[in-house]
Image: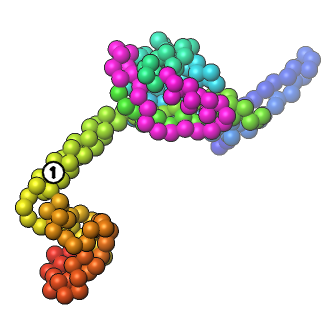
Amino acid sequence: FINTEVGINILEENRFINIIRDVTEQKKAKEQIEFQANLLETVGQAVIVTNPVGIITYWNPYAEKLYGWSAKKVIGRNIAEITVPQLSQDQASEIMSQIGAGKSWSGEFLVQKNNGTIFPAYVSNTPILNTKGEVNSIIGISTDITERIQAEQALKESEEQLRTITNNLPVLISQIDKDLKYTFVNQYYYDRSTFKSGIIGKEVIDVLGEETFNRALPHMRKALS
């Protein structure tokens, strides 16, 4: 079966013409549009569409959850008033200038909720151009990266603490990679080394000397296996 659309033109009394048109492709296109719209409604990222000057025209449900504003409250308002805190206004202006020139922008950006809470987000802004090459609209996708930032900070602090501890231990501590090059030495190791031009990245044999290296080589290979 095919999808058809029937039109009837009456020419005069008792005479008419049936016009039957195949609308299969039209129906498929409509279904595709509906699918894409549903996808935007359910995706786990904030999807915001604005016009070229930043007026919000679309705000998906996840944006409501992330920023605390309902779509009804923000449609027609400028994005800068809704999600951009004062400390990010200058950066936002630079980003809009870049997008106005038809270029995409992605990166970390501080945004805010409707209660004023500021948090880090990864934002990707893409300009949509018309047939003349002019910016017709802007699609912004944002994700809260607070947990990632906190995890990175915790890891950094842990590494710094571990480095402080190892640097103060009165024992020789070093780390080498599979190519037998140094990736870390503690301060005690460095202070007692005759190789003073920098050890990280150097081959172990160059630092220890051939005789000591040959004695240590079986142990290093065993540790790396």
User: At which x and y percent is residue 105?
Assistant: 55, 38
Decide whether residue 105 is among the magenta residues: yes
Q: Is residue 73 above or below residue 135?
A: above
Q: Is residue 200 visible?
A: yes
Q: Is residue 10 left or right of residue 68?
A: right
Q: Residue lying furthest top in this view?
A: 73
- Res. 56 image quadrant: top right
Q: Secondary structure at mark 1?
A: helix
The residue nearer to you, when weighing 209 against 49, is 209
Identify the residue at image location x=55%, y=16%: 78
Position of 75 compared to 69: left or right? right
Q: Is residue 31 visible?
A: no
- The stretch in magenta equals 89-118
**Front-most of residues 68 and 42:** 68
Taking 127 as reference, is 143 left or right?
A: left
| Residue kind at label 1, given as amino acid type | Thr
Magenta region includes residue 209: no
User: In front here: 208 or 218?
Assistant: 208
**Horizontal and vertical percent for residue 158?**
18, 47
Residue 74, placed above or below residue 90: above
| Residue at point 26%, 37% (across, down) | 150
Residue bearing the label numbered 1: 164
Image coordinates of residue 136 in percent, x first then y, are 68, 28
Question: In the picture shown, does residue 176 fall above or below 73?
Answer: below
Which quarter of the image is occupied by the C terminus?
A: bottom left
